Image (tube, rainbow, N blue to C red):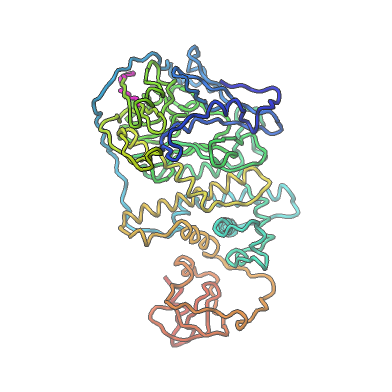
Amino acid sequence: MHILMQEMNPYVFYGTSKRYKAQVALPVDESEDEMACSDEEDEVIVTVRQGESESESEDGDEDEDGTTIMVENQQEEVQTENEEPGDGKNGEACQQQYTRAKNLVWKKCRTILPVPQWRGRLPKATDVKHPAEYFRGLLTSSCIENIVEQTNLYAIQCDPSKPLKVTVEEIEQFIGICFFMSIFGLPGCRMYWQSATRIDCVANTMALHRWESIKRNLHFSDNLKQAPIGEPAYDKLYKVRPLLTSLLEQFQAIPIDENLCVDEQIVPFKGKHPMKQYNPKKPKRWGYKVFVLADSSGMVYNFEVYTGCISPCNGQPDIGASGNIVLTLSSIIPDNISHKLYFDNWFSSVDLQMLLEKRKIHCIGTVRTNRLAGCCLPTDQDMKRKGRGAFEEKETIYNGVTLRAVKWHDNRAVTLLSTFASANPATTVMRWDKKKKTTVQVKCPSIVTKYNKSMGGVDLLDSLIALYRTKIRSKKWYHRVVFHMFDFAVVEAWLLYRRDSRDCGIPPKDVSSLAKFKAEVAGCLCMEKKTLKRRGRPSQHTEEEQPEKRPKTPVEPRPSTLVRIDQTGHWPVWVERKGRCKYPGCSGIVKVQCSKCVTYLCFSVERNCFLNFHKQ
């Protein structure tokens, strides 16, 4: 139920009322032990509009056992039983006449459903590429060239007397500096150029004034071609649409794994924009919402940025906002290969799972009991009296599709719905007993085990992005989306690198961490085929004032392979202190370093290690 509050409610604080807080406070037996597949995803989403002080909230729908279930607030209309599904906003002829499931016949069942065999296969990698190559495979050269063109155009539109004249190399250096900033994490951008907190890999790449000019004019689309507000062609994401489209094309070309999940993530943002959402159940409560299709390892194959309206998927019936977004994201999944798809109770419904099963996409999802038409499962009080580990299973057939609903009680009751999994064979899991002060064995249905194993892919992706998030303050609302997509691409590239490393048999200890991988990408973007422009007066410190500590063990050459062989900006520089030549097989003591690689190398007629070191 959607309620638009016309007047400010004194009991509302950031979109959540005290009455709502009293409803969702559920008693839990063991507070220390949270179940991974519990109903804690029942959440309220508040859309904050620019210039409005009112907030939108909604009432809970109370099901038959008295449990209050909060339904997520979406801005599109909710279809009732008397409405025709084909009468949506798009009104396309491909919309099928469809009647939602109601009054299904459920019966108890103890049989075991056979698990469908996945008929797909992931290609095996034969070699592991450089980190920068993985990243450039996602953020392509055509996308970079579009950024250069639109950034220069926007700078001229703002002030024709001051053209920016940015190049592809400078855009790559700008992105590389943003990645270095996400790794070092200083509180202010200008601190990377200040003498007290200077970071050489940032300050030596580009001048502060130039970097801020590129950031101020960074653009992806021509503002003069944007459709006015109110027209059908108007797009809220027009400013970043080319970037999103380019990344989507590359993500959708990645071979898809067997186990997939659909969930939402929040791009942190607290500025003023109508797309901003408030979700009190998320770690970052304010921001843009993105729906993501990923596998259990966090690798993304499809995503959709929420703009306030979710339209039905082309060629599919309208089953509501939560089901439509799953059908849209799963449209890239090939049919009849027996992929497994997992989602939580906001997405899950009988109609959604039936439509996916028709395409041989098998599903498991937690489900709200008021979406199981005609299914009479035991109440939470009855399950609690039976004790931890008690479960009940019921089965129905809907349009030729067999559905299983399982209700299990651990710390509290949870209901799951599936088209291929069942409760048996049940296993045991270890849980902490607060009364006995020890761990006990609790009976766990098979459907819960499968769900917990494969559902957390999007949450894992969020945690990886949050480790080294690009936190650059800006007055432009779309910059937060842009920097999030850059971090998105880096994490995706690292996951591809890990997959190839596993296929090639590389030990896990030799696989680069995300921080090292991102630093390698940033270093190549800043240095490969580019001449570093060092500005300002030379340092007044001498070698005696800052003695260099020699490492006790041999170290690898500082530059990466791509930087070493790019044949750009490598010049011999004579230094005061001697060092051993780093060319393999040479043990000469020299006073010559490469200006770009900062590596000791012989530079003479007899032993020209300098030229050999920079060859392939």
Is 145 positioned to the left or the right of 6 in the image? left
Is 155 positioned to the left or the right of 76 in the image? right
Is 393 positioned to the left or the right of 545 in the image? left
The residue at the point 53 percent across, 28 percent down is 24
**Please, is residue 393 above or below residue 580 in the view?**
above
**Please, is residue 483 above or below residue 385 in the view?**
below
**Please, is residue 432 above or below residue 586 in the view?**
above
Q: Where's residue 387, x and y in %?
A: 35, 29
Q: Where's residue 83, x and y in %?
A: 50, 14
The residue at the point 57 percent across, 80 percent down is 547
Magenta region includes residue 232: no
The quadrant of the image that shows the N terminus is top right
The quadrant of the image that shows the C terminus is bottom left
Residue segment shown in magenta: 396-406
Q: Main secondary structure of the magenta part?
A: strand
Residue 210 or residue 208, whichever sits in front? 208
Magenta region includes residue 404: yes
Direction top: furthest residue: 82
In the rendered image, is residue 29 in sight?
Answer: yes
Q: Where's residue 39, x and y in %?
A: 45, 31
Residue 65 or residue 576, whichever sits in front? 65
Residue 350 or residue 156, whichever sits in front? 350
Quadrant location of residue 166? bottom right
The residue at the point 44 percent across, 43 percent down is 300
Q: Where's residue 418, x and y in %?
A: 34, 28
Quadrant location of residue 453? top left
Direction bottom: furthest residue: 606
